[in-house]
Amino acid sequence: MIIGNKNFDFKNGVYVMGILNVTPDSFSDGGNYNNLDKALYQTEKMINDGADIIDVGGESTRPGHIRISDEEEIERILPILKAIKSRFDIPISLDTYKSGVLSAAKDYVDLANDIWGLKYDPNIARVIAQMGIPCCIMHNRKEPNYTDFFNDLISDLDESIKIAERAGISKDKIILDGGVGFQKSYEQNLSVIKNTDKICELGYPTMIATSKKSVVGLTIDKKVDERTIATVATTVVGVMKGASIVRVHDIVENVDAIKMTKSIMEGKKWTL
């Protein structure tokens, strides 16, 4: 898959997406990188540490967050997207579910990362298709009303894939994400991680995005800034189950874990 000007071999490789929240209220790093200098410093650090993609988010998606207008989100992200694109040779992902925001940022975005699986904004799939960029489709629901949890999750992802196809997004531009932390119980979140291989069986590159989330905190009973090692454990499981992208805050630790895991799996030294 081509993202930006980079070729990603998702059949054989595992890649790291670095999280850059330019928000005042994200659960892990809210307020840390919501000015230009800090955002650029963190971007450079993540690239040097081994990130393959930078995922920029302008609205918090933590439970109970306050949704903001398109205009406010655009105001937050646009200067930072422009600055990253002008300074660094790395693909940029935009974490948004709003077609207006994506359209405003179209000159700087190489991948659309939609936490609503193209279902919140009826226009976003069309915009992605017009831009000709890949998209990451995440599982989510307005209410956690499941009859048969994992079969329902797969069915929901199938619906999102059909939305993408109808809009003209080709199969080779789709990435899936099981949506850990979104409208799921603790046990259901564990199930998503454990069954990453079943999501992979749908035939698309699969991303695991667990970094410092509540499922990690509830498991180890530690604060957000003490969840790096446990997050690495989810990365190892995800990679062993077939994930080809890992979305994380802490790059070095996860890069090392991926290299070690893949080397063991393949019986030889493996590099990103």
Image (tube, rainbow, N blue to C red):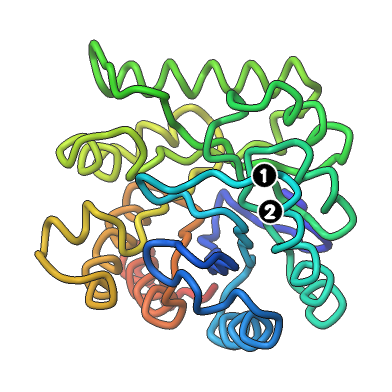
Question: Which residue lies under the disc numbered 1?
Answer: 69
Q: Quadrant of residue 74?
A: bottom right
How many numbered circles are shown?
2
Residue 149 lies, with reference to residue 72, above or below; the image says above
SS class of the residue under badge 1?
loop
Residue 49 lies, with reference to residue 164, above or below; the image says below
Q: Quadrant of residue 252?
A: bottom left
Judged left or right of residue 209, residue 3 is right
Q: In this view of the protein, which residue sits in the foreground, 270 or 183?
A: 183
**Crowd class of label 2 (few under 14; some 14 to 19; many from 20; radius 10 Å):** many
- Tell me whether the residue at label 1 lies in contact with that at label 2, contact meaning CB atoms closer than 8 angstroms: yes
Residue at the (53%, 33%) spot, across then down: 116
Cα distance in 3D space between marks 1 and 2: 6 Å
Q: In this view of the protein, which residue sits in the foreground, 141 or 74?
A: 74
Residue 141 lies, with reference to residue 213, above or below; the image says above
Q: Position of residue 106 (x, y in %)?
A: 86, 50
Q: Position of residue 206 (x, y in %)?
A: 49, 43
SS class of the residue under badge 2?
helix
Question: Which residue lies under the disc numbered 2?
Answer: 73
